Amino acid sequence: MRVVRVNRSTRANHFGTAVEKRMAEKRRFDLERASWHDARFGNGTPVEIKSTMHEHADGQPGNWKVYREYHKKLQRRDGWYCFVVYRPHGRSGCTVLRDKMVRSSDLPLLRWHGSGDHRGTQQTTISIGAVL
């Protein structure tokens, strides 16, 4: 029998995809795969869906990572963020605890860092408390 190990990144991707589908249904988005957004409203406005666990296995609170280049693109198109906090349960389930829509231009003050090595752009981390 072969044992397949699932790393944290794979599980996070699994939960992220589940959350995207739930939010698309709840908020009536059309899911769309693009590097800088996940969905669109019916009128074509782009939406980036950001999800995080409310608390990680090490006890640290969840947060969202935003990439500067994609954020600027979303702002230029008057796009929105859909921030979601979830709690995983079992091997594949999750419960959405809270979600909130925020216009990309209304995010709290962002402090960018990094040299752009990851995804070719700077990034920032947004705490759950800064949005919800």
Image (cartoon, rainbow, N blue to C red):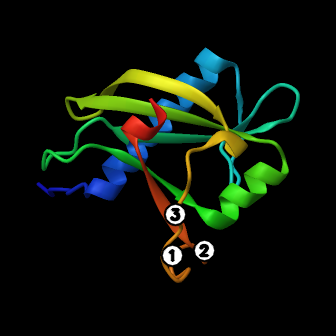
Cβ atoms under marks 1 and 2 closer than 8 Å = yes
> Which residue is identified by label 1?
118
Report the amino acid beneath label 3. Answer: Arg
Q: Earlier in the sequence, mark 2 or mark 3?
A: 3
Q: Which of these two is toward me, 95 or 18?
A: 95
Q: Is residue 57 left or right of residue 107?
A: left
Mark 1–mark 2 Cα distance, whole angstroms, equals 6 Å
Q: Secondary structure at mark 1?
A: loop
Cβ atoms under marks 3 and 1 closer than 8 Å = no
Q: Quadrant of residue 7?
A: bottom left
Q: Is residue 15 visible?
A: no
> Residue 120: x and y, percent?
60, 78
Report the amino acid beneath label 1. Answer: His
Report the amino acid beneath label 2. Answer: Thr
Decide: few, some or many residues near mark 2? Use Cα within 10 Å; few <14, some 14-19, many ≥20. Answer: some
> Residue 109: x and y, percent?
56, 52
> Residue 110: x and y, percent?
55, 57
Decide: few, some or many residues near mark 1? Use Cα within 10 Å; few <14, some 14-19, many ≥20. Answer: few
Q: How many marks?
A: 3
Q: Is residue 73 left or right of residue 121?
A: right
Name the quarter where the N terminus is drawn: bottom left
Label ID, residue 121: 2
Q: Is residue 113 visible?
A: yes
Label ID, residue 111: 3
Vertical side of 29 occupied by 14: above or below: below
Q: Name the front one of labels 2 and 3.
A: 3
> What residue is shown at x 73% (from left), y 59% (from top)?
72
Q: Earlier in the sequence, mark 3 or mark 1?
A: 3
Vertical side of 132 occupied by 37: above or below: below
> Residue 47: x and y, percent?
70, 38
Q: Residue furthest right?
A: 43
Q: Secondary structure at mark 2?
A: loop
